[in-house]
Image (tube, rainbow, N blue to C red):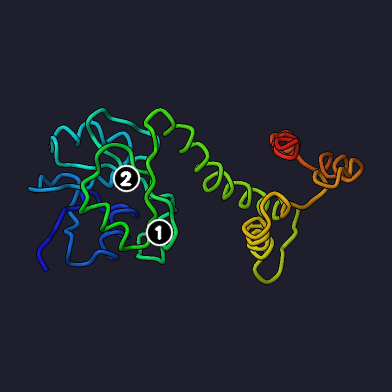
Amino acid sequence: MTTEFTILGRGRAGRALAEAWGSRTALVDHLARPEGLVLLAVPDRAVPGLATCFPGRCVHLAGSLHLEGVPCAHPLTSFDGHARDWTGTPLAITGAVPDDLRRAFGELGFAAFDLPAELKPLYHAAAVLTSGHAATLWLGAASLLRAQGVALPGRGLLPLAEATLRNVAELGAAGRTGPFVRGDEATIARDTEALPEPWREIFLKLGHSLD
């Protein structure tokens, strides 16, 4: 099969997409200067400079960054360097992404939608809250328990995290549980007292953020 485009950048996103697309694409280091259509799978800070190397023939993956005249296709997922089942995963399109590349993403299961440039920072902040910040909360909670000698058996906090995601996926806001949902002020007060800063403030602000 003829190579249709090149992925520039060997990070987790670049490796995962290259594995999924196989021979239809080439994966190269960020120092390469390939011909034809180029997908910039590089950190946000590197996009502006590299985009100038491929005028009119590159697309970047940066969810928050907008560059006039440089289209963006941002997959709303957390890459790990390997091809996964991305069926139903949103793909934010800003600017004129070539049809061939849109189809290539679609064949991997991504669901494209148009995202106005001015909404990209809000969209990306929501993504960070959902992924990076959620992971920080789970890892932080586990660290708080370990610091007090509490070693959870089995899979630790992961079953709770998975059940929470499942409930929210199936029930929406009604899938949210816990003392803040119940209005259990006595439990909230006890739990808050047990936490060190800054977790105490985070606990209260997050708990009341949907009030």
Q: Which residue is mark 2?
A: 73
Q: Amino acid at mark 1?
A: Asp
- The residue closer to the viewer here, 68 or 178, is 68
The residue located at (16%, 58%) in the rendering is 26
Badge 1: residue crowd in 10 Å (few <14, some 14–19, many ≥20): few
Residue at position x 56%, y 42% in the image? 129
* Placement of 157 over or under 184, stated as above or below: below
| Quarter of the view holding residue 162 | bottom right
In this orientation, which residue lies closer to the viewer: 30 or 174? 174
Residue 42 in percent (x, y) is at 28, 44
- Between residue 110 and residue 76, name the one nearer to us: 110
- Residue 74: x, y in percent? 36, 45
**SS for tag 2?**
strand
Please state, as top left, top right, bottom left or bottom right, where the C terminus lies in the image.
top right
For the N terminus, the quadrant is bottom left
Which secondary structure lies at badge 1?
A: loop
Task: Identify the mark at residue 35; answer none if there is no mark.
Answer: none
Q: Is residue 151 left or right of residue 64?
A: right
Q: CA distance from mark 1 to mark 2?
A: 18 Å
Circle 1 residue:
80
Disc 2 crowd rating (10 Å Cα; few below 14, some 14-19, many 20+) is: many
Amino acid residing under circle 2: Ala
Looking at the image, residue 130 sits to the left or right of residue 100; the answer is right
In the displayed structure, 156 sits above or below 207; it is below
The mark lying in front, picked from 1 and 2, is 2
In this view, the residue farthest toward the right is: 186
Q: In x, y percent, where is residue 138?
A: 63, 52
**Residue at x 70%, y 49% (from the top left corner):** 173
Instruction: Looking at the image, tell me whether mark 1 or mark 2 is earlier in sequence order.
Output: 2
Q: Is 163 positioned to the left or the right of 105 in the image?
A: right
